[in-house]
Image: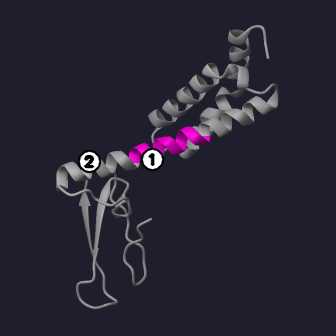
Amino acid sequence: MGEDPPGRFVEIYEHAYRPVLTYALRCCQDPDDAADVVAETFMTAWRRIEEVPEGDAARLWLFRVARRVLANHRRGERRHEQRTAAFFFGDPVPADRIKDGWIVERSRAYSSDAIEVTVIPGPEAGPAPTPSPGPHLWDVP
């Protein structure tokens, strides 16, 4: 594509850094995670500089890479939460019982309509999730 890959990378970086960073900041709760996503996105661009399209298509290409990096990051976070829960609580905890680092236990204690909810903080838990209104006191994704 180009005779000067380092120069082309610098041009792409200067043109797309801010938009990719803004996208990552909107998608990540932690600015450090967003910085990691941006760094990995541009590392991929550097390694695959010959595959990066010309012009404005390069920015779109970078957004696709960033989206994939974010998906991998989220999968890694879920695996980390499951392994941490398994370490502290013995048995592996299914992913649907972990929400933002908190382990959510649901049991039908009193009747088929009443649900007792127990929330146990994991070792890296953030703020406690808030109960949702309605007959099912808790929404687990």
Q: Position of residue 23 (x, y in %)?
A: 62, 40
Which residue is located at x 34 percent, y 45 percent?
A: 80
Residue 69 lies in the magenta stretch:
yes
Q: Position of residue 3 (x, y in %)?
A: 78, 8
- Within 10 Å of disc 1 (Cα), the crowding (few <14, some 14-19, many 20+) is few
Label ID, residue 75: 1
Q: Is residue 77 left or right of residue 92?
A: right
Badge 2 or badge 1: first in the primary sequence = 1
Q: Secondary structure at mark 2?
A: helix
The image quarter containing residue 42 is top right
**Res 125 visible:** no
Indicate how the structure is coloured in the image: one colour
Which residue is located at x 24 percent, y 48 percent?
A: 123
Q: Which residue is mark 2?
A: 84
Magenta part, dominant SS: helix
Check disc 1 and give the amino acid type.
Answer: Arg
Write down the region rendered in magenta.
67-77
Q: Is residue 44 left or right of residue 97?
A: right
